[in-house]
Amino acid sequence: MALLDELLKYISSGQVFGLPTMAFMAIPFVVGVVLGLMIKKALKMAILLTIIVALATYLGIVSVSLDKLKAVFDAYGSQAAMYAAMVIALLPLSAGLVIGLIIAFKFG
């Protein structure tokens, strides 16, 4: 019990890099909420863009072939993977981030 009391005392009254511990622990949660809102908005835009391209292809306005898609993936695929790895490496992975992502994705 002494260890738990010591931990709770540190969380409630300690400081990390000059910030109160509770504020320092809230940073990943806020990052998760912002990231969740951005991901949800990007998914909505991707779905809308997919529907527009499918409709334009059906009506014959745009021609999409597998060769064109392969060329796009060849040109930008490695860059996209590199940037995705950089973003994931910079994120403060914690329970606060995951909870923030879930809350923003569900209620955002």
Image (tube, helix red, strand yellow):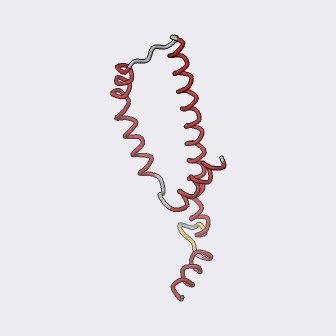
Which residue is painted at 35% across and 24% down in the image? 70
Q: Position of residue 78 (x, y in %)?
A: 34, 35
Q: Residue furthest top?
A: 60
Tell me if residue 31 can be seen. no
Q: Nearer the viewer, residue 11 or 69?
A: 69
The picture quadrant where one finds residue 43 is top right
Which residue is painted at 58% across and 32% down in the image? 45
In the image, residue 60 above or below residue 67: above
In the image, residue 45 above or below residue 96: above
Q: Position of residue 75 (x, y in %)?
A: 35, 26
Q: Residue furthest right?
A: 107
How many numbered callouts? 0
Judged left or right of residue 60, residue 13 is right
In the image, residue 63 above or below residue 5: above
The picture quadrant where one finds residue 103 is bottom right
Tell me if residue 88 can be seen. yes
